[in-house]
Image (spheres, rainbow, N blue to C red):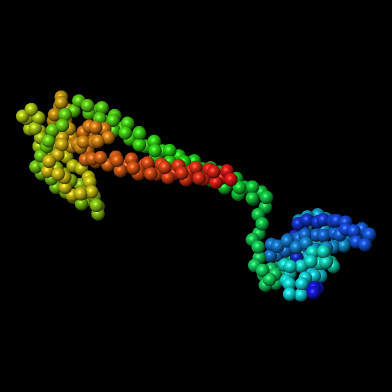
Amino acid sequence: MQKVMNRTLGGKIVSTSSSITNYNNCNEEIYQVTFMRADNRKMTISVDKDIYDKCINSNQKVIFDIDVVMEKEGDINHYDKKLTKARKVLFLGIDIDADTYAKKMEEDLVWLSRYAKPLPAEKSKGKKALLYIESYFVSIILFVAIFGTGIGSILAIPLTINHLKAQADKYANYEVTNGKVIEQSDRNLDEDLYEIKYTIEYWVNDEKYVIRDSLTQSTNSIWSEQHILYDKSDPNNGLLCEYNNVAKAYLPGLQGNSEYLFFVVMAIMGVLFLFIGVKMYFFKKR
């Protein structure tokens, strides 16, 4: 069983259409207008030829006086499009002013909200295109950044190895001897950072040399025995050093062989970022 409810509703005309139906061997032309209501829902109603001709241009703002035909237990969002008809139409700027139209739309929004939550406003085609372009370029930039980070992480491994080997070549004419720390003092720079001043003695060809210098590290002391790297032609300029398993040589500094941890981290990061990049690429393709 159906019921008829008379209601005035404002909105902007979206489209118009006409069609011919055959009923009892008689052709009948049906005219319909679709408009966007205050709750951003489209509503299609039947109109007569006179109203149809007035509404033929889209984007006109109007207020319709409508007889809405629906099921007895239905609501304004479940209605019969063919039987729901406009009895009258008022046009903004001709029959009504802007204030009247705006107040009507506010009233409609409150009333329509009782039946269903208003829909979000549709974005224009221009805005949709702009958002799509922005989204596309952001995706491309993100893909390049992630994929590039993966490649960079993996390339960091051979580059680091080449750098260490170049360092080894630089000190190829240096010799290594043992040195003894005869004095050291520390100064706390931060929670886990210390400046250590030290004095080290070492011997080359029965001649004593002394290093007085400082370094910064996470512990507050250095070992009492240290390896010293020195130039054969000038043993006076000795350097603290450690054997590096990657370069297969003694290199200045006390970093030890931390490169292995670096290689592991870079390899994991590289594979992970490459995997994410490939997944993004194929996901975008779909």
User: Residue 252: in sight, yes or no?
Assistant: no
Say above or below: 180 vs 231.
below
Q: Closer to the camera, 20 or 36?
A: 20
Q: How many marks?
A: 0
Q: Please give left or right for residue 180 compared with residue 33 in the image.
A: left
Q: Please give left or right for residue 71 compared with residue 163 in the image.
A: right
Q: Quadrant of residue 99?
A: bottom right
What is the residue that sits farthest to the right in this orientation?
25
User: Residue 223: in sight, yes or no?
Assistant: yes
Q: Quadrant of residue 97?
A: bottom right
Q: Position of residue 189 (x, y in %)?
A: 23, 50
User: What residue sits 67% from the left and 52% below the top?
Assistant: 124
User: What residue sits 48% from the left and 43% below the top?
Assistant: 277
Q: Position of residue 264 (x, y in %)?
A: 34, 42
User: What residue sits 22% from the left and 46% below the top?
Assistant: 217
Say above or below: 116 vs 256.
below
What is the residue that sits farthest to the front in this orientation?
24
Q: Quadrant of residue 52?
A: bottom right
Q: Position of residue 128 (x, y in %)?
A: 64, 50
In the rendered image, the quadrant that contains the N terminus is bottom right
Q: Position of residue 86 (x, y in %)?
A: 83, 66
Say above or below: 132 vs 34.
above
Q: Please give left or right for residue 269 compared with residue 277 in the image.
A: left
Q: Please give left or right for residue 92 compared with residue 49 in the image.
A: left
In the rendered image, the quadrant that contains the C terminus is top right
User: What residue sits 84% from the left and 63% below the top?
Assistant: 47
